[in-house]
Image: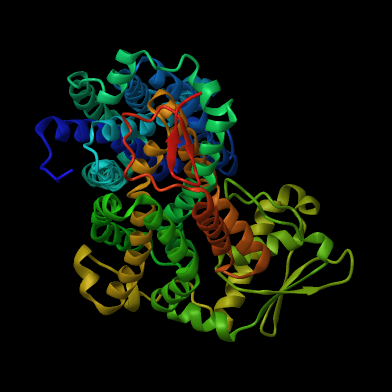
């Protein structure tokens, strides 16, 4: 089919559908950026450590329920229609975000504030689970044959828009009110402003028509009466969902999180670059790389979804180690040199050391070995292990200096003070030995956004840009690929679940898992094995089982996908 310009109706469809995903990321970054303030406001009856745990758990709750939202709203979308279902999801999502802005704090209504906040986060997660699948399905079913990759790729760009929108609103509000007023009541303003996005989005979506594919299915009476059982209870369809999960979205999710979120964590927490500079570096890489979503979506219409997505996973797996090592050398050369030349050893009873998987990244370990490893991991220090006699207290040896750890259970009420003293002593010993306290300001410190034209920031942004290119390769064509795997009667249900498991669970667990791997091994790059292993697994599974789908006519797909041929046979 010869390419043609988008019609006015098609542009409206893409714009209206994309607003929902802007909401998704606007809310995500708002809550993540303001988690400390939210913890203080809604979990104020607890001590600081406990309130931070609860605040982050409430944040994680939104991720954990997304697959359940995919099931609930996917079923609804296949039964009553795409338009009305993702109109419901955006109403739930936008209203929940707005209510956070007017919700009384724990000082006013006690524990009820925390309970209501968690309920709102669960509602947001459920709505988000239905939003993406609805938007992707709706746009794809409006797109002309041969241009679905290009049309749906516009939805993928809205993550960046949501990021910048939230950062701009927070920055403007903080600047206008001052830090004290912002922490007191001004933090509510970004949540309250979401009502404007909601109003515009609902107004536009009310004017849209149902998708042509769904209308055709309804007119022919071929709709599913039980989308959930048909999509996942029948092996012929369930295996397609499994192929989509393990052969596409699992690798896509970990590559996406590594390029956008883990890269920021690595620069800021591991390489000790100041927060302002780290965010500017990521922001510039996003600005420069966002066009890749549309480019690879368009390219997938020419050469296929499968080769681009799997190539992005493969390139990421091959190059992550050299890229992150180069990032260390450029962003913090003093740390890089110290890692190479100054030996650090944890001397401990092996039975005292455990795997530090901690989803909320808070200090909850009690053994002397685990405390030592956690402090060194937080300080971005590579270390080796040396066995000590059974029952002995662990120690950190830095060059010729030895710093004894402690057992939190034995310290009792003094554990918090003992931990602070131990961390302080380790930091002093590290600095004395030659480890830098932070990134060298003369190397990467950015006073304003246009410092990117200095040599070192430009090199770092170049590395981050490569990571973002991998993100755009795996994420740009993914919506079209998922839509084309499933027939119209179960499309909304079938595509939503593997997407949200791949991104919400495999991707969402990446920060906690990578930190645990770093702490367990003493290697600041060891956490990269998490995305590499899943990306490689996706490449292997994808090559063998995932069919190419770019030429499928989604108006006539009513049967089962055959992975070996990439064709559908009639429904039984």
Whether residue 398 is situated above or below residue 352 in the rendered picture: below
Q: Nearer the viewer, residue 232 or 410?
A: 232
Q: Position of residue 260 (x, y in %)?
A: 39, 55
Quarter of the image holding residue 299?
bottom left
Is the residue 163 above or below the residue 184 in the image? below
Q: How is the image coloured?
A: rainbow
Residue 465 or residue 213, whichever sits in front: 213
Q: What is the count of numbered marks?
A: 0
Q: Vertical placement of 244 versus 513: above or below?
A: above
- Tell me what residue is drawn at x 88 percent, y 71 percent: 389
Quadrant into which the N terminus falls: top left
The answer to whether residue 507 is visible is no
Vertical placement of 468 versus 170: above or below?
below
Report x, y in % for residue 220. Answer: 33, 15
x, y percentage for residue 311? Answer: 41, 61
Residue 501 visible from this viewpoint: yes
Position of residue 141 in the picture relative to residue 437 (left or right): left
Between residue 28 and residue 292, name the one nearer to us.
292
Query: Closer to the camera, 564 or 5?
Result: 564
Task: Locate residue 551: give its quadrant.
Answer: top left
Side of 451 where 339 appears, left or right: right
Find residue 173 and report its horizontal and vertical position in percent: 25, 41
| Left or right: 48, with 329 as reference point | right
């Amino acid at each position: 089919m010869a390419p043609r310009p988008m019609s006015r109706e098609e542009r409206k469809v893409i714009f209206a559908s994309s607003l929902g995903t802007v909401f998704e990321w606007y809310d995500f970054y708002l809550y993540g950026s303001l988690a400390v303030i939210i913890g203080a406001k809604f979990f104020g009856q607890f001590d600081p450590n406990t309130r931070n745990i609860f605040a982050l758990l409430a944040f994680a709750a939104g991720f954990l329920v997304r697959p359940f939202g995919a099931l609930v709203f996917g079923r609804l979308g296949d039964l009553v229609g795409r338009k009305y279902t993702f109109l419901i999801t955006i109403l739930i999502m936008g209203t929940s975000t707005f209510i956070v802005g007017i919700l009384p704090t724990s000082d006013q209504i006690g524990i009820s504030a925390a309970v209501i906040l968690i309920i709102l986060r669960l509602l947001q997660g459920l709505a988000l689970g239905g939003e993406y699948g609805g938007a992707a399905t709706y746009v794809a079913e409006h797109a002309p044959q041969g241009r679905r990759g290009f049309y749906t790729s516009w939805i993928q760009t809205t993550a960046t828009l949501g990021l910048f929108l939230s950062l701009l609103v927070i920055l403007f509000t903080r600047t206008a009110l001052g830090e004290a007023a912002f922490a007191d009541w001004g933090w509510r303003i970004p949540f309250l402003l979401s009502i404007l996005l909601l109003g515009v989005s609902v107004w536009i979506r009310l004017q849209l028509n149902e998708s042509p594919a769904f209308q055709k299915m309804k007119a022919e009476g071929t709709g599913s009466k039980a989308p959930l059982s048909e999509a996942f209870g029948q092996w012929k369809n369930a295996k397609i969902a499994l192929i989509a999960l393990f052969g596409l979205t699992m690798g896509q999710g970990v590559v996406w999180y590594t390029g956008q979120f883990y890269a920021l964590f690595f620069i800021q927490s591991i390489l000790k670059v100041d927060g302002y500079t780290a965010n500017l570096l990521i922001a510039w890489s996003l600005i420069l790389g966002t066009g890749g979503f549309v480019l690879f979506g368009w390219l997938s219409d020419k050469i296929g979804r499968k080769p681009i997505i799997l190539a992005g996973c493969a390139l990421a797996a091959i190059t992550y180690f050299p890229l992150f090592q180069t990032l260390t050398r450029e962003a913090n050369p003093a740390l890089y040199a110290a890692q190479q030349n100054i030996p650090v050893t944890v001397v401990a009873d092996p039975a005292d050391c455990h795997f530090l998987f901690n989803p909320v990244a808070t200090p909850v370990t009690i053994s002397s070995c685990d405390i030592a490893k956690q402090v060194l991991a937080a300080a971005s220090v590579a270390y080796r292990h040396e066995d000590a006699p059974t029952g002995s207290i662990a120690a950190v040896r830095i060059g010729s200096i030895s710093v004894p750890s402690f057992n939190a259970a034995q310290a009792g009420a003094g554990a918090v003070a003992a931990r602070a003293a131990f961390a302080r002593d380790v930091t002093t010993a590290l600095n004395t030995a030659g480890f830098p306290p932070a990134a060298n300001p003369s190397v990467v410190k950015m006073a304003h956004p246009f410092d990117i034209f200095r040599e070192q920031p430009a090199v770092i942004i170049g590395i981050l840009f490569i990571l973002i290119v991998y993100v755009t390769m795996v994420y740009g064509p993914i919506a079209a690929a998922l839509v084309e795997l499933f027939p119209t009667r179960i499309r909304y249900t079938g595509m939503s679940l593997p997407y949200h498991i791949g991104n919400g669970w495999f991707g969402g667990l990446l920060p906690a898992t990578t930190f645990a791997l770093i702490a367990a091994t003493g290697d600041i790059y060891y956490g990269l094995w998490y995305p590499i292993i899943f990306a490689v697994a996706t490449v292997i599974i994808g090559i063998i089982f995932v069919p190419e789908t770019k030429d499928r006519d989604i108006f006539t797909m009513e049967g089962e996908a055959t992975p070996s041929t990439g064709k559908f046979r009639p429904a039984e």
